[in-house]
């Protein structure tokens, strides 16, 4: 299996941002490619949602809201790791590259949010 082709996407500051593309777009069954892309989207969405919930958790004083956020963050983690496990079965090398991109993306987004 060929390692993924990455589209180089840069944000306004010239930082690389996440590129969600199927790793083996040639030769792989369309269902496999769609599943791969869906898993990447679940990981990215749940990861970012978890971070925003964590930031809100730090800022809120309401114990009731904190409990809601803790439950939501737990759900986000479960979704992320379920998708991660499935993606690792499909292509562990692609997972590694994707998570590195996701970490860079979160750093850019969250540093802009906190600025």
Image (cartoon, rainbow, N blue to C red):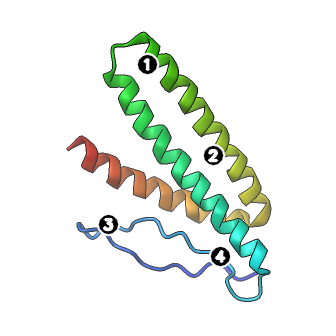
Classify 10 Å Cα crowding around label 3: few (below 14), some (14-19), many (20 and above).
few
SS at mark 1? helix
In the image, residue 30 sits, relative to residue 18, either above or below, namely below
Disc 2, SS: helix
The Cα atoms of the two marked residues, 1 and 2, are separated by 22 Å
Residue 25, compared with residue 101, is above or below; it is: below
Percent x, y of residue 34 = 69, 71
Looking at the rendering, in which quadrant would you find the C terminus? top left
> Label 4 near label 1: C-beta < 8 Å?
no
Q: Mark 3 sits on what residue? A: 15
What residue did someone put label 4 on? Answer: 23
Distance between the Cα atoms at labels 4 and 3? 22 Å
Q: Which of the two labelled residues, at mark 1 and mark 2, occupies the earlier sequence position?
A: 1
On screen, residue 109 versus residue 93, left or right, reads left
Instruction: Provide residue 60's location: percent of width, then percent of height.
Output: 33, 20
Label 2 belongs to which residue?
A: 80
Label 1 crowd (10 A; few <14 / some 14-19 / many >=20): few
Residue situated in front as seen by the camera: 12 or 64: 64
Identify the mark nearer the N-term, 1 or 4: 4
SS under mark 3: loop
Q: Is residue 20 left or right of residue 85?
A: left
* Labels 3 and 2: the sequence-earlier one: 3
Q: Residues within 10 Å of mark 2 (few under 14, many from 20)?
A: many
CA distance separating discs 3 and 1: 34 Å
Marks 4 & 2, CB-CB < 8 Å contact: no
* Residue under pointer 1: 65
């Amino acid at each position: 299996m060929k390692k993924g082709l990455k589209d180089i996407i840069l944000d306004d500051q010239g930082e690389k941002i996440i590129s969600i593309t199927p790793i083996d777009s040639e030769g792989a069954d369309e269902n496999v490619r769609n599943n791969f892309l869906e898993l990447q989207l679940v990981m990215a969405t749940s990861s970012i949602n978890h971070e925003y919930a964590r930031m809100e958790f730090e800022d809120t004083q309401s114990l009731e809201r904190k409990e809601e956020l803790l439950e939501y963050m737990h759900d986000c983690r479960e979704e992320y790791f379920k998708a991660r496990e499935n993606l690792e079965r499909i292509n562990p090398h692609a997972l590694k590259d994707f998570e590195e991109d996701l970490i860079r993306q979160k750093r850019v987004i969250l540093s802009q949010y906190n600025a």
